[in-house]
Image: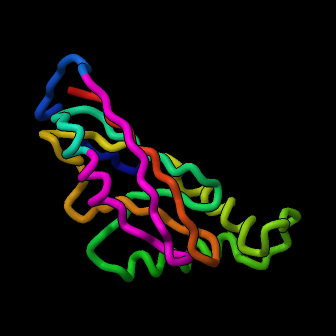
Amino acid sequence: MRQSGKIGPLEDFSAGDVTRQASARVTVATPGPGFTEITEAVAGFVAESDLRSGLVSVFCRHTSASLTIQENADPDVRVDLMTALDGFAPRHGQYVHGMEGPDDMPAHIRTMVTDSGLTIPLRDGRLALGTWQGIYLIEHRDRGHRREIVLHVVGA
């Protein structure tokens, strides 16, 4: 029988009213397939909102690009992730949908298995990301695009 982990007590518990919200859009020009880190843009939005606690929503308005939270220390991680996505949804598979080229349907599949939206807690006016975490837009198409990201924060 496999042993389960132990869950510790709640720490740093806080409660309060949601009193404000803010929203904005940011456009990201991607160079082509791969990861573009957008952590600083999201952190800048949070700073401008002047909220100290709450939730930040990051939403990609496209079906052939996506978002992820991933390691930001070693770029080899992102290379390996792209290799894995290439193997999972190859560009020249036997897809029915192909009106926009051989990279379009694999891009939709890759978006489906990653995320179009992320929610990140806000604590003490900062994104509550882990030490090695960054927020990335993943371009799944073979050429660069202009991708629109919608940001929204609610909190106090």
Front-most of residues 131 and 145: 145
Indicate whether 15 appears above or below 2.
above
How many discs mark residues in the rendered view?
0
Q: Is residue 18 magenta?
A: no
**Residue at the image point whose x is 73% and y is 67% from the top:** 104
| Residue 150 position in % (x across, y down) | 45, 45
Indicate whether 143 appears above or below 70.
below
Question: Image quarter for residue 93?
Answer: bottom right
Image side of residue 37 versus residue 28, left or right: left
Image side of residue 124 versus residue 84, left or right: left
Extreme-right residue of the structure: 96
Question: Image quarter for residue 146?
Answer: bottom right
Front-most of residues 116 and 7: 116
Q: Is residue 35 magenta?
A: yes
**Residue at the image point whose x is 18% and y is 21% from the top:** 15
Image side of residue 144 versus residue 91, left or right: left
| Residue 56 position in % (x across, y down) | 33, 40
Stretch of the chain drawn in magenta: 20-45
| Residue 145 position in % (x across, y down) | 57, 68
**Residue at the image point whose x is 18% and y is 46% from the top:** 126
| Residue 113 position in % (x across, y down) | 59, 56
Question: Image quarter for residue 13?
Answer: top left
Extreme-top residue of the structure: 17
**Residue at the image point whose x is 24% and y is 52% from the top:** 44
Front-most of residues 53 and 27: 27
